[in-house]
Amino acid sequence: MYIILNMTTKTNICYSFFMVDIFSDWLRANSLDSQFLKRNLVDHPLPFFLIGLGAGGDDRFLDLSGEAAWEMVAEALTAGIPELSSLIRTVRMRVPKSFEANEERGGRAYTYDRGPKSLPFVHCPYKGTASDVLTVAHEFSHALQIVASRRTAMPPMARELCAFVGERLLLTWLRDNQPSLSPFMETAWLADNSSYLGTSLQSLVRALEDGSDVYDYAWNYPVARLLAHAVGYEWSSGKTALLFKSGAKAPSHLAEFYERAH
């Protein structure tokens, strides 16, 4: 989750929408079009390995503190995007963070963008489960994107794409460096897919079919989840680094995906 300045809820994040059809405004804000969504999320079945199949069992508790998870994520991102190593170090060492629960926000994790003159703040309630470690990767990547593109605000879908790319980089690093943790982390990632490509996708499809006068931040997740998968397989680390730095220009970096038939 990503919060800009003093905004406090998902419905208020980043953009204000005033027109009756909020969904059309969301499409424009992210440089998306409805046909792209239909081609990739409606007209064709999603790949079976992305929809949460096999994500059974309890969320495994790991012998890993929040600080240790933060350090591990920093190492994984440095290996995956070495071009951003100095900025990753800045996030690792200087970004203020909390791993305590905050009931005022419903116990949710968030990254708070405090403006161009301050570093972001990361709040990540942490109990030590595999899904908690993924959340640390997600919020660390939000903070990295903010630090990397300080001058302009990135559209919400692209922000979530950067956060999901960070999760994938952690999973890739774990397979080679912490293979004992990898199965539990993969299972947690699949379980998240069952939400992002389940209930979140259902909300997006309803808005796609009927429009919406209410903004649902969950619309950003299905598109970002699929694009993160493509970026992970197709892009070099240098190209990924440019995305994190791109700010408001992020849609131009993603145009190659938007123009494909499927």
Image (tube, rainbow, N blue to C red):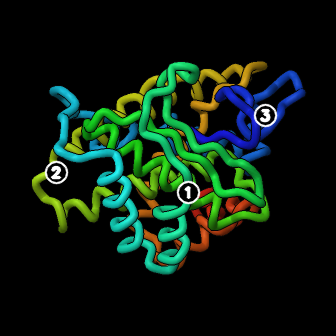
Q: Quadrant of residue 190?
A: top left
In primary-sequence order, the first of circles 3 and 1 is 3
In the picture as drawn, the residue positioned furthest to the right comes out as 19
- Residue placed most toward the observer, 20 or 243: 243
In primary-sequence order, the first of circles 2 and 1 is 1
Across and down, in percent, residue 232 comes to 41, 63
Residue under label 3: 24
Position of residue 95 relative to residue 60, above or below, is below
Residue under label 2: 181
> Does residue 195 appear left or right of residue 4 in this picture?
left
Tell me how far mark 3 sits from mark 1, CA to CA.
35 Å
| Secondary structure category for the residue under label 2 | loop
| Secondary structure category for the residue under label 1 | loop
Category of crowding for the residue at label 3, using alpha-carbon neighbours closer than 10 angstroms: few (below 14), some (14–19), many (at least 20): some
> Does residue 181 appear left or right of residue 216 in this picture?
left
The answer to whether any part of residue 5 appears in the image is yes
Category of crowding for the residue at label 2, using alpha-carbon neighbours closer than 10 angstroms: few (below 14), some (14–19), many (at least 20): some
Residue under label 1: 95
Tell me how far mark 3 sits from mark 2, CA to CA.
42 Å
Residue drawn at x 49%, y 68% as measured from the top left: 88
Q: Quadrant of residue 256?
A: bottom right
Labelled disc at residue 239: none
Residue kind at label 1, given as amino acid type = Val
